[in-house]
Amino acid sequence: MNQPAMPKLTYRQWLNKQGCRFAPALFFIALLVFWELICRLGNVPQYILPSPSAIVEAFFNVEFSRWMTHLWATLRVALMGFGLSILISLPLSIGMIRSELLNRTLYPALIVIQSTPVVAVAPLIIVLMGTDDPSRVLITCLITFFPLVVSTTTGMLETPPELIELSQSLRAPRYRETWQIRIPYAIPHIFSGLRVSITLAIIGAVVAEFVAAEQGLGYFIQFSTSFFKIPQAFAGLIFLSAISLLLFKSVQWLQLWLFPWSLPKKK
Amino acid sequence: MSESSENNHQQAYVSMKNFGHRYGPDPQAPIAVQDINLDIHRHEFVAVVGPSGCGKSTLLRMVSGLLIPSHGEVSVFNRAVTEPRDDVGIVFQKPNLLPWLTVKKNVLFPLKHKYGRVREEDKKRADELLKMTGLSAFSDKMPDELSGGMQQRVGIVRALLLNPDILLMDEPFSALDALTREQIGFDLLDIWRDHPKTVLFITHSITEAVLLADRILVMSKRPGTVLDLIEVDLPRPRNAETINSARFSELTNIIRGHIYEPTSHA
């Protein structure tokens, strides 16, 4: 054994390492088992707390095509609202960075919009704009655009001043300063805003469905609850969370794929 | 300490006359720099040394046209500086490379940024400059794959791309460790020998100033005024031995004297 061996881990170090690796999954499984046991041993009625097995059963009792219809309805509104948010917030942020007047004028208005609970405004929007997609998209947009504006402006303002001086010393046009320096610098911030916003988009779509809808996962959950199909409501809820998580992850993958340099370096 | 240029028939590339700056129009506003008179000649290397906050960087920004002086005048090629010029390149304190561009694209960035496009001959020139500075092997690497010293070398190459007549350097090596710093100083001398430029070099390192410069402007604490203008008569090419010479220590001691006893100057 002359070759330099890997430093040997003590048993305790090894256990620690493996623990860190599997602890989250183990904790999750333990939680499920605990939940199942409480429901079975305590004879908890299903309409109060359904057991995990009952939820799984309820999930498969709903036809796949029905799931897809509801999923599509929610996803469509969430993604349209999210897309609209991006379209609004990016030009808005650029405008606010470039013009002090615009910044002073719009910032208070944005704060007011952000401080108004969207849940409370949603019924008014439905009354005002009808029960179709546009009003749902607007509700989603209202809930998602603020984090995007804040993250984009923060990112653009954090551009090193010396780089702005470099741009000025070259007498480059302002739009190139924005596009070639400030916006790329804001990418990490923009993506953290996007991650927050995409999960908010799902929340926005569900809020809109709670107010008025005939389709969508939010509607499905509400409908199931009102008929005391609690396991089915839970199944809808878990499906919704899974979709939300998937979207969150997709934004991360998108960043890794398009802007690998913008991610913190792993050691 | 009259101007040393009277017997010099060369045209001054950079000229500062009774030049100073006050932050804001209020007469009580703090003065950054005061009463600077200096002519910098063709292919001359002038260093500015002074304690932190003496307005060295303000001085450089005014020569570059990024900041307009409140008093006096600074002119480049006999024209008052009112805005940044194409024939002046700047190397900043930090390399300030764009993390999303490769080394080569960073070098080409000033052209891309100024004109929106890069020609084939520019790419060739970038390659040559990278080769000259020993960075060829890194031209497709991302900035964060390079050491601090190499990043700042890229920063220098970027400033050289537009082939400026005048190079302004704002404490370019201050973020580097001592060993790298000395090495990159010698590298800069090599580049300067092969591609002579008129250089205004801001630093707070006395030894760096003596090693690199032809003349050294020693500045006092705020408000920054000129304490002395020292001719560095060390022979070129300068190298590690220069640092060990008696004259080198003599010169550094003179400057040190000025900086630590500012009241003793005439």
Image (cartoon, coloured by chain):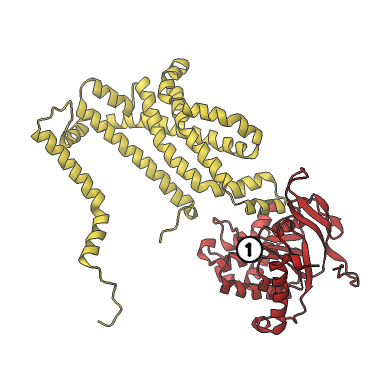
Chain colours: A yellow, B red
Which quarter of the figure is the N terminus of chain A placed in?
A: bottom left
B233 lies above or below B10? below
Q: Which residue type carries mark 1?
A: Gly
Q: Spot the residue most to the top.
A: A127
- Does residue B11 show up? yes
B256 lies above or below B51? below
Left of B20 or right of it: where is A100?
left
- Residue placed under numbered mark 1 in the picture: B155
Image point (63%, 69%), residue name = B130
In the foreground, A13 or B209? B209
In the foreground, B213 or B1? B1
**Callout 1: residue from which chain?**
B
Left of A240 or right of it: where is B60?
right
Q: Quadrant of residue A61?
A: top left
Which quarter of the figure is the C terminus of chain A placed in?
A: bottom left
Q: Quadrant of residue B168?
A: bottom right
- Does residue B116 show up? no
Image point (45%, 19%), residue name = A125
